[in-house]
Image (cartoon, rainbow, N blue to C red):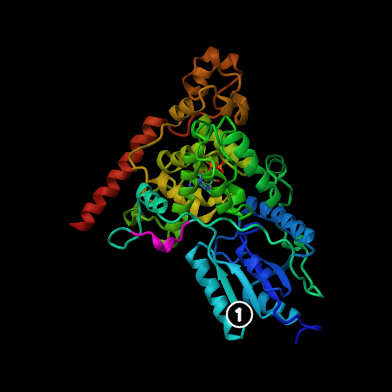
Amino acid sequence: MPDKTPSSGTTLVWFRRDLRLDDQPALRAAAETGAPVIPVFIWPLAERAGWTAGAAGQWWLHHSLLSLQAGLRQRGSRLVLRQGEPLPALLALGRKTGARRVHWTRSPDPLAAQAEAETAAALRARGWRVEIFPPHVLFPAETIRTAFGNPVRVFSAYWKQCLAQPFPSSPLPAPGKWRSPSRWPASDRLEKFELLPRPDWAGGLRQAWEPGEAAALRALRRFLRAGLEGYGQARDWPGVDGTSRLSPHLAWGELSVRRAWEAVHSRPKSRGAAAFLRQLGWREFAHYLLWHFPQTPEQPLRESFVSFPWVSQPGHLRAWQQGLTGYPFVDAGQRELRATGWMHNRARMVAASFLTKHLLIPWQAGARWFWEELVDADLANNTLGWQWVAGCGADAAPYFRVFNPSRQGERFDPLGAYVRRWVPELKRLPDRWLHRPWEAPARVLSDAKVRLGREYPLPLIPHAAGRARALAAYQRLRSRKRGGHA
Ligand code: FAD
């Protein structure tokens, strides 16, 4: 029985990775009923087993929930926090408040969506009304197919079909005010979720980021004003602030992807607009692939890669994680990640390539590390990124294309701003040797106060040897495949 005077028609709005009020159809529809609305968040997030937010993501989530609470308070509402399995938590809230109606946004992950469907069925069986709103993507995954009706696996063909579709509908403004219950159910304290790291290592994250919806909208405005025009050129240079840095805001749903799309699409004359929309297209493609191939966070999309001859070298994995591979560009990326919870896309590609090709460590180990360390960790984008680099995913770089980490550094960080920032022990090295310190003459190294193997490591493996070993492993896979088919 409800505690007291249940409000008939009360609607619960169950928030997950959609921590915003703007363009929030589930909340808006609840507000429009005219009946009381109770916003709810349940920890842990009902994502697929084994993929609860990692440590950096939890730090982000803590602050994002504070921001959502503040936004709701400004509108005379609250966020009710609960811990546990979604179904019992929602039922308990129903008993307390008399609510028999709940709204939420569907997860773009099919396994999570299936769990949600089961929750919905169990609620409906108890007489609840459940409304599930479309996931946080621009184009529905179900509508894009090859001529044979299969999922599209090539990005350019996928994106062409998306752009031929009706454009995403305009984002909805946040509802102004709505009715609140006369009595609020008790809420857990956010601290009880223990999302903040102990001991506190999050100083670098605090310096680099401001989580929450208000900050997300400010970041979007700042990017439109100062970043979009030059985005097409600057986006590949990790040493300059050339990308939007919207990824954690999008990953946590603090920023509606339709809001970002519309803001940029309405500036077609801006030189960076098409390039930026194309990157949102990669986000779409990642979510599309996860929808059609739900096994891919753990399994390669190209099945032949299941038997790839990976090598397990925990010492190498640790050196890579700590930014001590001996390749300055890779190490800069890894240290940026550890310090700020984010890594520039170019560095992500090169670091991931080094792990999977030079070190032959399974991409899944790298994906797990990113999941733990990234504030923008997103199951779809992370899976696509790793499988793309490892050569086993959709539209992937062919396995035999092995990034040369020194050349990548020289090309995309020619003046060394990125490496000097994150690998300061090399900052006195002249540009010419910065990305390949082991080739520097002894005199240059001693002038720069670098002793290789002391202040900075020698490469874990020479590039040529790493490349040859990777190609040999690939050949073995191919001959096994041929043998298997014989
Ligand atoms: P911008 O260049 O400003 O792009 C705008 C938005 O487009 C991004 O915020 C993101 O939502 C989307 N986007 C851009 N590039 C990609 C891409 N290659 N794939 C999918 N979406 C993209 N991105 C994540 O959001 N979460 C992850 O967990 C993640 N893991 C990755 C792992 C690897 C190995 C690689 C190579 C890439 C990964 N990416 C991931 C994609 C990309 O690196 C980041 O989205 C990007 O660096 C975020 O910075 P930004 O917001 O400044 O990007």
Q: Residue at x 60, y 17 (%)?
A: 448
Categorize mark 1 by other alpha carbons within 10 Å: few (<14), some (14-19), many (20+): some
Amino acid type indicated by mark 1: Arg
Q: Is residue 409 above or below residue 283?
A: above
Question: Which residue does the image show at 59% across and 49% down from the upper left?
Answer: 376
Magenta range: 139-145
In screen coordinates, is 424 left or right of 380? right
Front residue (pair 209, 386): 209
Q: Position of residue 389 (x, y in %)?
A: 42, 44
Q: Is residue 360 left or right of residue 344?
A: left
**Can residue 244 be found in the magenta stretch?**
no
**208 or 426, which lies in front?**
208
Mark 1 sits near ligand 1, with its Cβ under 8 Å away: no
| Extreme-left residue of the structure | 486
Quadrant of residue 333 in the image? top right
| Residue 255: image location, x then y, percent | 62, 52
* Residue farthest toward the bottom in the current orientation of the protein: 1
Front-most of residues 334 and 29 = 29
Give percent across and percent down for residue 415: 54, 22
Q: Quadrant of the C terminus?
A: bottom left
Split into 4 quadrants, where in the image is the N terminus? Answer: bottom right
**Residue 353, image x and y in percent?**
44, 40
Q: Report how many numbered discs are placed on residues in the image.
A: 1
Could you tell me which residue is drawn at 60 percent across and 81 percent down?
Answer: 123
Q: Does any portion of residue 326 appear in the rendered image?
A: no
Regarding mark 1 in the picture, which secondary structure is present there? strand
The answer to whether residue 30 of the structure is visible from this angle is yes
Nearer-the-camera pick, 351 or 144: 144
Instruction: Please name the residue that numbered disc 1 is placed on.
Output: 129
